[in-house]
């Protein structure tokens, strides 16, 4: 096992002739917490999709949890990889008609098989683990509430509990706070970091105020290229300004 | 800086003018329909509408089933010279008629139920092909869509007449007629509920490493099943109503009693059949609404 969780070299991703991502080198060690920032369309979500195999790169090499992503992994190999990667996505994707508990139990599907789990019948120890996960995110009393009856912050907590059920080695959070108010956003970030202890955490964020909580290292993406890769302490107002192009280009 | 947007206000006034033009066109069309019918002398209420109305109403407000209790037990049919031709027990006759009606109701319910289920099963693959978000090959999805449109545009009765010509009279013809017409309705409703699926939730379940059957049972099924059941109840209920008319073309059931009553001018019996149809449809409607509400 290499000491890198993610290792990428000369990674290029084109979509319909347009270069979305062009990364010379990028690596993440096991247990590291990093944040990716950048303007809309900078390639952040594309990078996250490459890491889970929901998209494939055009050229270059990308190694995630000791798998070479560009070697045409079989769908089965991809499933085994996704089992080890916990995801919290933007837009609060829960199955609306299932209860919070059932949504959390979905996180255990990667290690279950057979007809029983197709009928949504779970082993007793998984149900206990799911209740524990809900308790950990502070939603123990809402286990039987349907997902579409939960508030935005509660939904994101359920999504985190579902991710915890996977016992992932790598956690990817793509704008986990996009749909939340500032107070709930800070809570969710703290919860995410607490839950991710022991695993590698990669977060895509927009709000610079959340960076110190979420990450030790910050990577700035601009038009598909990495423009800086520095410890969080070195993030300055000026760096953010040039990243987001807050000043007009011509002045 | 002026806060107005000249191009925007121009498009607003263009839209308003378009709406006014459409409204005028509509009323011109209505005038053309009415005017041409009047000029062909086709708008008339007959020779003595009031008298006929009173006559029909009198027959209607005395439904035939009342005779089960209040009918004449010795109704004598006499010839012109006073000879008794036949004696009829009205109470017995109407009791037998009500029994026949119960059997006919059962036939109607069976036609509607089996026809609806067959339609739902036939439409499912077509709905999967025509749902835009599933990305079926263009040719297939176009074919499926056309098939559903054709099926929806041909009335159950027309299908019925064609099928009776092929397989003969009876409930089977009714079942197939209902199935072929409702297939189009089901297909459209099913495709719409598939199109409203939250693809994000499906990706979220895939991202935990779930197998395709697991994705189907945990993300797709919980989202579409209640809508499918709700659509099914809706169309089923519609078909109970629709199949009462299928008897007219010889599929059996309540429609046949309606045809008989009309051709024999037995308005009292027609009244009884219509009451049964009303009770049947209303109670099914109430039941299906309860179930649909508890599902959503």
Image: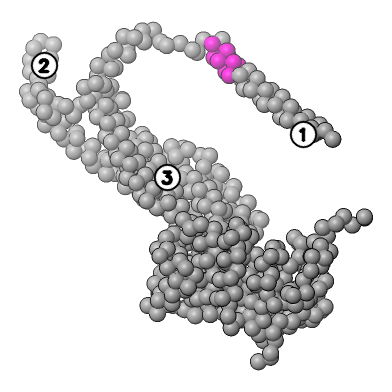
Q: Residues within 10 Å of mark 3 (few under 14, many from 20)?
A: many
Whether label 3 touches label 2, CB < 8 Å = no
**Mark number, residue B8:** 1
Secondary structure under badge 3? helix
A136 with respect to A200 (left or right): left
The chain holding disc 2 is B
For marks 3 and 2, the one nearer the N-term is: 2
Question: x, y (%) of residue A105?
Answer: 46, 72
Quarter of the image where one finds residue B105:
top left
Secondary structure under badge 1? helix
Q: Are marks 1 and 2 on the same chain?
A: yes
User: Residue at image x 12%, y 19%?
Assistant: B77
For marks 1 and 2, the one nearer the N-term is: 1
Could one spot residue B248 in this view of the protein? yes
For marks 1 and 3, the one nearer the N-term is: 1
Q: Which residues are magenta?
A: B30-38
Could one spot residue B115 in this view of the protein? no
Question: x, y (%) of residue A62?
Answer: 73, 80
Mark pair 1, 2: CA separation: 85 Å
Q: Which residue is mark 3?
A: B235
User: Residue at image x 40%, y 10%?
Assistant: B46
Whether the magenta-drawn stretch holds residue B15 is answered as no
Look at discs 3 and 2 and give the one toward the viewer. 3
Secondary structure under badge 2? strand
Q: Which residue is mark 2?
A: B78
Look at discs 1 and 3 and give the one toward the viewer. 1
Quarter of the image where one finds residue A179:
bottom right
User: Residue at image x 55%, y 43%?
Assistant: B150
Question: x, y (%) of residue B198?
Answer: 56, 58
Quarter of the image where one finds residue B271:
top left
Q: Residues within 10 Å of mark 2 (few under 14, many from 20)?
A: few
Q: Is residue B293 above or below residue B220?
A: above
């Amino acid at each position: 096992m290499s000491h890198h969780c993610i290792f990428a070299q000369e990674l290029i991703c084109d979509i319909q002739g347009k270069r979305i991502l062009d990364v010379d080198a990028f690596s993440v060690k096991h247990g590291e917490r990093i944040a990716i920032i950048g303007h809309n369309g900078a390639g952040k979500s594309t990078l996250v999709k490459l890491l889970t195999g929901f998209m494939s790169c055009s050229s270059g090499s990308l190694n995630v949890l000791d798998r070479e992503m560009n070697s045409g992994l079989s769908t089965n190999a991809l499933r085994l990889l996704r089992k080890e990667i916990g995801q919290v996505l933007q837009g609060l994707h829960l199955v609306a008609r299932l209860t919070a508990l059932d949504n959390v139990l979905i996180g255990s599907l990667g290690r279950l098989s057979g007809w029983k789990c197709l009928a949504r019948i779970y082993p007793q120890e998984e149900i206990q683990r799911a209740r524990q996960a809900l308790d950990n995110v502070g939603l123990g009393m809402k286990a039987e509430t349907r997902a579409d009856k939960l508030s935005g912050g509660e939904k994101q907590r359920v999504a985190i509990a579902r991710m915890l059920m996977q016992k992932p080695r790598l956690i990817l959070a793509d704008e986990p706070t996009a749909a939340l108010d500032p107070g709930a956003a800070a809570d969710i970030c703290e919860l995410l970091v607490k839950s991710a202890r022991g695993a590698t955490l990669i977060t895509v964020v927009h709000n610079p105020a959340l960076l110190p909580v979420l990450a030790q290292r910050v990577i700035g993406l601009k038009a598909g290229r990495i423009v800086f890769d520095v410890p969080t302490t070195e993030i300055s107002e000026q760096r953010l300004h040039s990243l987001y192009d807050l000043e007009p280009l011509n002045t | 800086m002026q806060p107005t947007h000249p191009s925007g206000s121009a498009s607003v006034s263009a839209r308003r003018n378009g709406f006014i033009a459409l409204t005028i066109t509509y009323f011109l069309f209505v005038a053309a329909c009415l005017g041409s019918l009047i000029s062909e002398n086709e708008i008339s209420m007959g020779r003595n509408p009031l008298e006929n109305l009173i006559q029909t109403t009198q027959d209607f407000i005395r439904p035939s089933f009342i005779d089960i209790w209040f009918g004449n037990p010795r109704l004598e049919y006499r010839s012109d010279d006073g000879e008794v031709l036949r004696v009829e027990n009205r109470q017995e006759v109407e009791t037998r008629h009500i029994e026949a009606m119960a059997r006919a109701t059962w036939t109607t319910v069976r036609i509607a139920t089996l026809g609806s289920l067959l339609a739902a099963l036939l439409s499912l693959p077509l709905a999967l092909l025509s749902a835009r978000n599933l990305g079926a090959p263009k040719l297939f999805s176009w074919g499926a869509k056309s098939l559903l449109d054709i099926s929806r545009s041909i009335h159950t009765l027309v299908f019925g007449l064609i099928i009776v010509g092929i397989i003969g009279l009876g409930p089977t013809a009714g079942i197939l007629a209902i199935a072929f017409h409702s297939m189009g309705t089901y297909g459209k409703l099913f495709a719409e509920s598939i199109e409203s699926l939250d693809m994000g939730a499906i990706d979220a379940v895939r991202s935990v490493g779930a197998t395709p059957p697991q994705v189907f049972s945990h993300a797709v099924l919980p989202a579409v099943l209640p809508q499918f059941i709700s659509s099914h109840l809706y169309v089923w209920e519609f078909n109970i109503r629709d199949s009462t008319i299928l008897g007219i073309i010889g599929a059996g059931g309540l429609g046949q009693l309606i045809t008989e009553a009309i051709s024999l001018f037995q308005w009292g019996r027609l009244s009884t059949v219509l009451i049964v149809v009303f009770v049947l449809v209303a109670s099914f409607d109430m039941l299906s609404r309860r179930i649909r509400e508890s599902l959503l």
